[in-house]
Image (cartoon, rainbow, N blue to C red):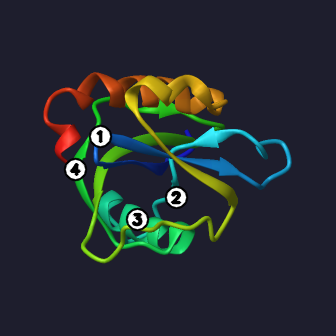
Amino acid sequence: MTERIVVVGAALLNGGRLLAARRSAPPELAGRWELPGGKVEPGETPEQALARELHEELGIAAAPVGRVPGEWPLKLPYVLQVWTARLLPGSDDPKPLQDHDELRWLTPDEIWDVDWLDQDVPAVKATLLGWGSGAQAY
């Protein structure tokens, strides 16, 4: 059995809005939207990977808040775990630095205005379920 590789996604919440990132690569994913993040590297915790990926991809400092219940299969051997996160002071302007060409802060009413990657849809839905339980404070 192949060992699974965890990919962490950030449900980055700020002022009652969720950050979505539009993929620019690879070509088969370009133009679709996702929760930013990436692979957990050997020796990293998911929380450390989340902070590192957000710094690399968006140029921001963010702190994980809590894990969204659930885990979603990606292309084998990858699985997606999502963590809510908040921006740290001084990091209020994320920029699409790596693998993305556009970012959007979405209100709950705008969540489905973007074309999410199929594998991110259940993770976004799970994030929305927890949104009303205090997540809007981030």
- Are there few (<14), some (14-19), or many (20+) residues within 10 Å of tag 2? some
Q: Position of residue 115 (x, y in %)?
A: 67, 30
Mark 1 or 2: in front is 1
In the rendered image of this protein, does residue 84 appear above or below residue 58? Answer: above
Look at label 4 and name its amino acid.
Tyr
Q: Position of residue 67 (x, y in %)?
A: 26, 43
Residue under label 3: 49
Mark 2 or 4: in front is 4
Q: Position of residue 37 (x, y in %)?
A: 50, 56
Q: How many marks?
A: 4
Q: In front: 18, or 126?
A: 18
Residue under label 1: 16
Instruction: Identify the residue at the far right of this view.
Output: 27
Look at label 3 and name its amino acid.
Ala
Q: In front: 67, or 73?
A: 67
Q: Residue at x 13, y 36 (%)?
A: 134
Q: Evaluate if marks 1 and 3 touch, with contact meaning CB atoms under 8 Å apart.
A: no
Disc assigned to residue 138:
4
Q: Distance between the residues labelled 1 and 2?
A: 27 Å
Q: Distance between the residues labelled 2 and 3?
A: 7 Å
Q: Distance between the residues labelled 4 and 3?
A: 20 Å
Q: Where is residue 40 in the image (x, y as percent from the top left)?
A: 46, 61
Query: Which SS class for mark 4?
Result: loop
Q: Residue at x 34, y 26 (%)?
A: 128
Disc assigned to residue 39:
2
Q: Evaluate if marks 2 and 3 touch, with contact meaning CB atoms under 8 Å apart.
A: yes
- Are there few (<14), some (14-19), or many (20+) residues within 10 Å of tag 4? some
- Are there few (<14), some (14-19), or many (20+) residues within 10 Å of tag 3? many
Look at label 2 and name its amino acid.
Lys
Query: Which SS class for mark 2?
Result: strand
